[in-house]
Amino acid sequence: MIKKLFLNDNFILILIILNAINIFIGGFDNGSRNNFILSLVDNAITILFICELLVKLNQYGKNYFISNWNKFDFILIIISIPALITFMLSVEISDLSFLLVFRVMRVFKSFRFLKFIPGIDNLIKGVNRALKASIIVLLGFVVYIFIIGIFSFYLFKESSPEYFGNPMVALYSIFKIFTIEGWFEIPEKVTLGLSTINSFFTFLFFIFVVLSGGILGLSLVNSIFVDAMVSDNNEDLEKKIDRLETKIDYLLKQQKQL
């Protein structure tokens, strides 16, 4: 009975949903007693997940790891064990940052919900295909951001240290401009105190950045990514059309013979 329960996907889905709700509620200030109850529920669910893992390993053996979803579940359960250990041993984690990281990892258990989404396998295949098709463009885009970011750092580090004070901040500022997030705010603050001619060329530079990266660059990446995601559907339609044309040709030949 218990074995069948842990092999039942509906039961596991309920546990995953309860775990996600419990973690969400635990993020609020609920008082020490309620927080302890929530933590107790969270770790009880972790124990149930560990039992599920053991039951499935016993049931399927090495075949358990054939499925990528099972591998994913295995990793998520394993990384949640340290949080369970700290709870059972009543270890104080407020001053131990590395243990706090393990505590935070319990949130990743909610990712197990992904495998229950209808059509998720096709979606993942589409994303994987799109990433492979657009990897060169993505790498080129990253290099372009890096070049423009470093160039901007040396140009504006003195006039606008808030946005270009060091290379990392400069890269982040350029990325914001590329996403059309700070395309007008950043140039206006950079040009404060500059002469008219310097302001003109500064605005010209940022117009080029917005057009080349924010509009043309991102549009190119998005178009390639989306096209690659739907290409599998197009290929299926083309195959169906080819088969339909073959059948039509065959029927026409049969009709002529009659």
Image (tube, grey):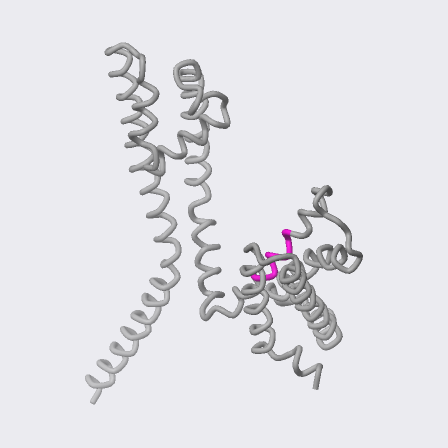
Task: State the residue in front, 5 or 99.
Answer: 99
Give residue 188's position: percent from left, percent from top.
30, 23
Q: Position of residue 69 (x, y in %)?
A: 59, 65
At 45% across and 35% down in the image, what residue appears?
A: 142
The residue segment tinted magenta is: 104-110
Q: Residue furthest bottom?
A: 258
Residue occupying image coordinates x 35% and y 53%: 227
Prevalent SS, magenta region: helix
Left/right placement of residue 159 relative to residue 98 reads left
Where residue 249 appears, as percent x and y from the top left, is: 25, 76
Does 238 appear above or below 197? below
Quarter of the rendering occupied by the N terminus:
bottom right
The residue positioned farthest toward the right in the image shown: 89
Q: Is residue 206 magenta?
A: no
Spot occupied by residue 258 in the image (x, y as percentages of width and height): 20, 89
Magenta run includes residue 106: yes
- Image-based side of 223 in relation to 141, left or right: left
In the image, is residue 217 above or below residue 230? above
